[in-house]
Image (tube, rainbow, N blue to C red):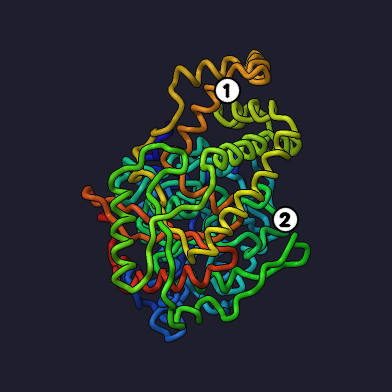
């Protein structure tokens, strides 16, 4: 497991010699007034919408906010390692060109996966990906159009494959609440940057829980939108065969709503269009919330243990919902959780060799990938096309069962995580197992044994270890439905532990309305990790 770079060399974590487009020297200009209008404690007391209001009112300006964000990044980078690449020159150029939009002047970080910036590599946390993006992704373009000042890309695990953030290329990211623990993944860098006060919100993507898991680990709001709500283009139509959705990690519900307004809407060539909201999502927060029927469960869909703190988080949320007048019933969708997990992981294993082949076709070497990725790619090649098609056909059954559940209940409440944020290294394959699998891969025997079914127990164990701490999130990805993690619980040790609400397709507005009601009843914005 990689450790973070010492404080004396904090910038080395951000760039490598193979990254020719990284900014070697930050360019920082003083605010036009010649004196600071806002200090860091004040900056941290503002969400993104409040910062934008401050810029419009002349209480701050884009240059000053960028300096504050960069200064904070410099302070936390050696300990937490949230950012993989600085884009300070690009940020300065944005400011000099003039900013417009509802969030003009607010510092923002993209994820180094799925958020392309023209002229900059999107590395997916891997030594194997160095191709420079030809154009901005629609996500990036919409962020710029809203006036957000993009000054970097956050860390993620290789190929965004894990619920932790530990790429060999950039090093491990740590949780601001306890640096000995993970911030989650794959948008772990984004969550660490927001929780530590670098930015009020940051971009993320969620293919199996990768927005919600880090939000739950770091005491933040993480909304995974419905399939098709935010375009994946122009580089992709559906990422992970529709499992992935782009979004943001924030500290406030209204920032999540405002960014969904910014990012939502179809683009030419998108595979399908989802119905637009009847009102902008931010405006929906002002509408009265009706009494909701909410089903809830604390049982792991895999039958694996659930930590007592995760159970308590849901039970306390149920009590709060009842006090607010909502109807709650212990109930879960009639879905075989083990079958859903296996179908998800079959897709997961199928996608890895495809990603490896893409990188090799662009000039990468297979040895540029991390050992576990190469092992999983070998195992993935042993799957048949027929098995993958059969897996995808199961998804309809899961969606129909969830639809029947939502005919009875508006929302479904579960833990986001099965345990508090885990220490670094939890779930890693044991060294002896890794050495054995890597040796079998090098000799060509791994694929042979896998095709014969002789490694099924080892594969099942790897899968089980990967999902046992995060068994609740994949349902939304497979069914294409929205889900949100809310920071409603802190453990006896002072660690955040979010709870998750699932909604029916297109119900982001309802999730945000309930989130706003819960945020008012149990405020979390001022709960911050100690430096």
Q: In this view, does 8 lie to the left or right of 454?
A: left
Q: In which quarter of the image is the C terminus?
A: bottom left
Which residue is rendered at x = 40% and y = 40% of the image?
A: 5
Please tell me the numbered disc located at residue 237. 2
Q: Is residue 19 left or right of residue 106?
A: right
Q: Can residue 266 be seen in the rendering of this structure?
A: yes
Q: Earlier in the sequence, mark 1 or mark 2?
A: 2
In the orientation shown, which residue stands out farthest toward the right? 269
Please name whichever residue, 249 or 367, is drawn nearer the observer in this view of the structure: 249
Please name whichever residue, 430 or 299, is drawn nearer the observer in this view of the structure: 299
The residue beneath circle 1 is 456
Residue 488 picture location, percent across and down: 32, 60
Label 1 environment density (alpha carbons within 10 Å; few <14, some 14–19, many ≥20): few
In the orientation shown, which residue stands out farthest toward the bottom? 57
Name above or below for residue 196 compared with residue 346.
below
Which residue is rendered at x = 37% and y = 49% of the image?
A: 298
What is the secondary structure assignment of the residue under circle 2? loop
Please name whichever residue, 54 or 96, is drawn nearer the observer in this view of the structure: 54
Label 2 environment density (alpha carbons within 10 Å; few <14, some 14–19, many ≥20): some
Q: In this view, does 399 lie to the left or right of 458?
A: right
Alpha carbon of mark 1 to alpha carbon of mark 2: how far?
A: 33 Å
């Amino acid at each position: 497991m990689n450790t973070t770079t010492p404080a004396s060399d904090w910038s080395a974590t951000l760039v490598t010699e193979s990254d020719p487009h990284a900014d070697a020297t930050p360019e920082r200009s003083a605010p036009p007034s010649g004196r600071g209008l806002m200090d860091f404690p004040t900056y941290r007391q503002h969400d993104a919408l409040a910062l934008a209001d401050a810029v419009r009112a002349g209480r701050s300006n884009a240059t000053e906010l960028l300096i504050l964000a960069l200064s904070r990044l410099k302070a936390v980078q050696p300990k937490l390692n949230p950012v993989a690449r600085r884009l300070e020159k690009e940020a300065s150029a944005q400011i000099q060109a003039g900013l417009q939009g509802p969030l003009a002047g607010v510092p923002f970080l993209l994820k180094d996966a799925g958020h392309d910036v023209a002229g900059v590599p999107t590395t997916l946390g891997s030594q194997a990906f160095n191709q420079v993006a030809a154009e901005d992704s629609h996500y990036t373009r919409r962020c710029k159009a809203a006036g957000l000042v993009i000054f970097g890309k956050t860390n993620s695990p290789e190929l965004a494959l894990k619920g932790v953030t530990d790429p060999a290329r950039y090093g491990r990211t740590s949780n601001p609440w306890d640096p000995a623990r993970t911030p989650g993944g794959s948008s772990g860098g984004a969550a660490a940057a927001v929780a530590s006060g670098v930015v009020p919100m940051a971009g993320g993507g969620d293919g199996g829980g990768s927005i919600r898991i880090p939000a739950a680990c770091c005491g933040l709001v993480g909304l995974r939108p419905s399939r098709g709500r935010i375009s994946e283009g122009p580089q992709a139509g559906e990422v992970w065969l529709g499992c992935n959705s782009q979004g943001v990690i924030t500290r406030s519900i209204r920032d999540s709503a405002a960014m969904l307004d910014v990012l939502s809407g179809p683009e030419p060539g998108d595979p399908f269009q989802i119905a637009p909201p009847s009102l902008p999502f931010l405006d929906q927060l002002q509408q009265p919330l009706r009494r909701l029927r909410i089903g809830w469960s604390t049982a792991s869909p895999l039958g694996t243990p659930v930590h007592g703190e995760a159970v308590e988080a849901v039970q306390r949320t149920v009590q709060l919902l009842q006090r607010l007048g909502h109807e709650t019933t212990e109930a879960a969708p009639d879905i075989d959780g083990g079958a859903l997990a296996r179908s998800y992981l079959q897709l997961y294993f199928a996608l890895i060799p495809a990603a490896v082949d893409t990188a090799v076709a662009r000039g990468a070497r297979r040895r540029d990938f991390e050992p576990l990725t190469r092992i999983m790619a070998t195992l993935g090649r042993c799957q048949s096309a027929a098995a993958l098609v059969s897996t995808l056909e199961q998804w309809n059954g899961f969606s129909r069962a969830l639809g029947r559940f939502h005919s009875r209940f508006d929302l479904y409440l579960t833990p986001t995580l099965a345990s508090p944020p885990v220490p670094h290294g939890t779930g890693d394959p044991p060294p002896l197992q890794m050495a054995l699998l890597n040796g079998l891969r090098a000799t060509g025997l791994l694929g042979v044994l896998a095709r014969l079914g002789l490694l099924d127990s080892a594969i099942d164990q790897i899968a089980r270890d990967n999902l046992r701490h995060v068994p609740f999130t994949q349902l939304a990805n497979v069914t294409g439905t929205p889900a949100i993690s809310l920071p409603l619980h802190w453990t006896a040790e002072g660690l955040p532990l979010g709870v998750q609400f699932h909604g029916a397709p297109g119900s982001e507005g309802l999730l945000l309305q309930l989130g706003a009601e819960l945020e008012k009843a149990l405020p979390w914005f001022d709960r911050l990790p100690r430096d």
